[in-house]
Amino acid sequence: MIIMGIDPGSRKTGWGLIRHRAGKSEHLGHGTIVLGDKTPLPERLVILAEALDALLREHRPEACAVERIFSAKSARSALVLGQARGVVLCEIARAGVPIHEYSATEVKKSVTGTGGAAKTQVVRMVRVLLGQAQELEENAADALALALTHGVAAQLAKYR
């Protein structure tokens, strides 16, 4: 199964693509959609939608894993993140790809073994699990961690 993980953000959105089969995950690609700080929010959302549309068309994932909403530091941050997340969910749905949502705690626990892991631990474990020698940008690593989490969850669901 080809799984795309997406870590939504209003300034940077990470994406990661894996193939998961027979209990093993293979890295297929990753990146960060940089939306910028100075660009007005409506324009950033259009850039995000267009970039995701292109990625979904190019890679044709069979499932997408997206981080479940969490409480942000401020109401404004939560609103802006919610708008970016809405664009992500809309584009995935438009592409007809099933959406699976996981909390940050679920992803950290799945990848590192503990729900309270630091970002650096997540990045390191994603690199180990996918055999990546190169450094990974945090947003892309989070997206790959989401994809890995769904790969394991989907495999476990087969045995229930």
Image (spheres, rainbow, N blue to C red):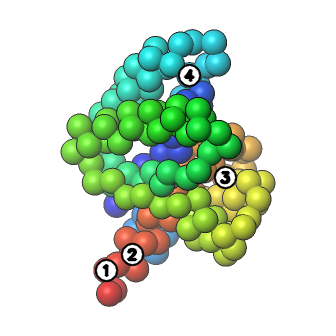
Kind of element beneath mark 3: loop
Kind of element beneath mark 4: loop
Looking at the image, is mark 4 or mark 3 nearer the viewer?
4
Q: Which disc, if any, is residue 9?
A: none
Outermost front residue = 75
The residue type indicated by label 3 comes to Gln
Marks 1/3: CA–CA distance: 28 Å
Residues 91 and 130: in front is: 91
* Horizontal and vertical percent position of residue 49: 38, 26
Looking at the image, is mark 1 or mark 3 nearer the viewer?
1
Q: Quadrant of residue 134?
A: top right
The residue type indicated by label 2 comes to Gln
Looking at the image, is mark 2 or mark 4 nearer the viewer?
4
Q: Which residue corresponds to mark 1? A: 158
Mark 4 or mark 1: which comes first in sequence? 4
Q: Which residue corresponds to mark 4? A: 35
Kind of element beneath mark 1: helix
Tell me the residue at 64%/18% (across/down): 37
Q: Which residue corresponds to mark 3? A: 132
Q: Are marks 4 and 3 in contact (CB under 8 Å)?
A: no
Q: Which disc, if any, is residue 155?
A: 2
Q: Are marks 2 and 1 in contact (CB under 8 Å)?
A: yes
Kind of element beneath mark 2: helix
Inspect this view and state whether residue 42 appears: yes
Mark 4 or mark 3: which comes first in sequence? 4
Q: Are marks 4 and 1 in contact (CB under 8 Å)?
A: no
Query: On the rendered structure, is 24 left or right of 154?
Result: right
